[in-house]
Amino acid sequence: MTRVVVVGASVAGVTLVQGLRELGFAGEIVLLDAESGRPYQRPPLSKEILLGTSPERADLVDEAGLESIGVDFRPGETAERIDVADRRLLTARGKLPYDHVVIASGAAPTVPAELRHLVDDGAHLLRTRRDAAALAAVLRSERSLMVIGGGVLGSEICSAAVSAGLRTILLARPTPAIGPLHGVFAAPLIPLHRAHGVEVRTEPARVDRSAGGWTADGGDHPALADAVALAVGVDATACWLANALPTTVDGVRCDTSGRVAPGVWAVGDVADRAGGRYDVSRRTQSAAIAQAREVARRIVGAPQQRTAVPYFWTDLHGIRVQAAGRIPPSAEAHVVERDDAGTPVAFAAVDRGRCVGAAAWGSARGFRRARAMLGDTTIPQEVSR
């Protein structure tokens, strides 16, 4: 009997095992996860759960649901090493032979050496359900929060903190970037935070903890806060694979189909797919789901479905931020729509004379217009940097 072992009960891992059964796969499926408890998805951690509402929104499926489709779910069992030649996985409980193994273990928060003292002193990270519960307690009990890192996660934490009534300080880079959006495409980010009361600081600062709380020394006056959250990126190195498979800080190197080696696949955050670096859906839930469905079809030999246009979204301070397609560094920003004050809120990304991406800040109509331009080579109006 064919055995598929999936490492990681992430949304990618759960989607893959469900997809195998939906495609008629009758072999054995083993789903490992380093965490204990039922599988859950991560996007709600920085939204509903951080605000202490709808904790069930994170649940993917319970053990009974996995058992009903014939999945051997093993929470708390960690993968430690892989033998590609012999097709064996070494876990905390012993050797596990496989015909196919799918790496869906996600990524972990990056903590650069110069910031490790912050974690040692009690700064919060946000990656797991336990992390979300701890940070949610801060939002309920403290009066101020300092967030280090102005990307997607850091911005979502700021949005939640403002909603909870906390004085919020954001330490970010001078050049805004959020997910796939950079340069002009990300220009609304800092003004949006400031419009909702976030104190944004872009000058270099050293953060330390003292008896009175946390202090960021930099600029004309220090910033003070009761608590600190660190969100400066993720590392998908997957160290346990480093001696057997090609890995980088972006994850396990694989081809555009997710294949890493014979019988070895990668999906989700840990998959460093060739050619996908500038897809706007990179490291998003939509990408993880799409990759998992694709790899499930490849394992069973089913025909591939049409690839959907890559898509990214987040909600910040009640504003829906959206992007579609690809936005490489060389892309120019064409303003598709402005708000009543004349501020650009929707853009088409133009690369080598062709529209390759779309982005919008709180403008559903503008996003539809920009997305409809994907693939066009005739771009009207002025293109701005």
Image (tube, helix red, strand yellow):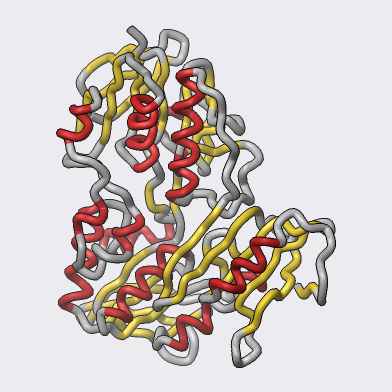
Please report the residue visible at 26 percent of the width from the left and 66 percent of the height from the top.
50
Please report the residue visible at 23 percent of the width from the left and 49 percent of the height from the top.
59
Image location of residue 192, percent across then percent down:
49, 82
Question: From this viewpoint, is residue 175 visible?
Answer: no
Q: Is residue 263 above or below residue 276?
A: above
Please report the residue visible at 45 percent of the width from the left and 67 percent of the height from the top.
149
Question: From this viewpoint, is residue 343 visible?
Answer: yes
Image location of residue 45, percent across then percent down:
29, 59
Image location of residue 294, percent across then percent down:
50, 32
Quadrant the C terminus occupies? bottom right
Number of marks drawn: 0
Please report the residue visible at 19 percent of the width from the left and 27 percent of the height from the top.
67
Left or right, 103 with respect to 184, comes to left
Q: Quadrant of residue 207?
A: bottom left
Q: Is residue 13 above or below residue 357?
A: above
Q: Quadrant of residue 29?
A: top left
Left or right, 267 with respect to 338, comes to left
Image location of residue 351, percent across then percent down:
78, 58
Q: Nearer the viewer, residue 65 or 3?
A: 65
Q: Is residue 234 above or below residue 335?
A: above
Q: Nearer the viewer, residue 342 or 184?
A: 342
Q: Nearer the viewer, residue 251 or 65?
A: 65
